[in-house]
Image (tube, helix red, strand yellow):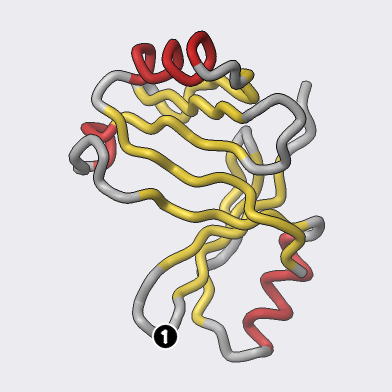
Amino acid sequence: MITHVNVAVMYVADQERSREFYVDKLGFEVVRDEEMWPGARWLEVAPRGAQTAIVLSSAADFGKRPGEGAYLTFACDDIQATFRQLGEAGVKVTDPVAEPWGTYIKATDPDGNEVMIVQKAPRS
């Protein structure tokens, strides 16, 4: 089942400017910096040694405004087992989606809030 908070997504106006702030100013490290799809960037930063990270996501790529909330994600060890367990428990959950950075599902809470649950891909 769920092991810890994986990442929080922060919507930013300029990913590079935000990277410079968190890495150069606050001392975070870049965990991942990869293309999500052509023109979109997955930029994940975290305090050194931390389990939980922040994704600095381009607000424009997702129709958001900079500073508009944070999107919470959780991590798991086995996405397929978690998918089955949540479904059996009556949780509204999406089918698993595989991406270069990991495989995820989305679960919806009683208020309609979606949370993402991720099994991270091994680092290359």
Residue type (three-letter) at the residue carrying disc 1: Pro
Q: Residue at 78% across / 21% down in the picture?
A: 124
User: Along the line of sight, which residue is nearer the eye, 111 or 38?
Assistant: 111
Q: Position of residue 58 (x, y in %)?
A: 31, 29
Crowd tier of the residue under label 1, counting other residues whose Cα lies within 10 Å: few below 14, some 14–19, many 20 or above: few
**Looking at the picture, does residue 118 appear above or below residue 110?**
above
**Looking at the picture, does residue 7 appear above or below residue 31?**
below
Image check: 7 left or right of 120?
Answer: left
Image check: 30 left or right of 71?
Answer: right
Q: Position of residue 79 (x, y in %)?
A: 72, 60
Secondary structure of the residue carrying tag 1 is loop
Image check: 35 left or right of 69?
Answer: right
**Looking at the picture, does residue 39 appear above or below residue 70?**
above
Q: Position of residue 99 (x, y in %)?
A: 58, 40
User: Along the line of sight, which residue is nearer the eye, 86 or 45?
Assistant: 45
Q: Residue at 71% across / 25% down in the picture?
A: 48
User: Along the line of sight, which residue is nearer the eye, 106 or 112?
Assistant: 112
In this view, the residue farthest toward the front is 26
Residue where numbered disc 1 is placed:
110
Q: Residue at 55% across / 54% down in the picture?
A: 73
**Looking at the picture, does residue 72 appear above or below residue 108?**
above
Q: Residue at 42% across / 85% down in the picture?
A: 110
User: Along the line of sight, which residue is nearer the eye, 54 or 108?
Assistant: 54
Quadrant in which the N terminus is drawn: bottom right
Locate residue 75: give its quadrant: bottom right
Tag count in the figure? 1
Q: Position of residue 43 (x, y in %)?
A: 49, 25
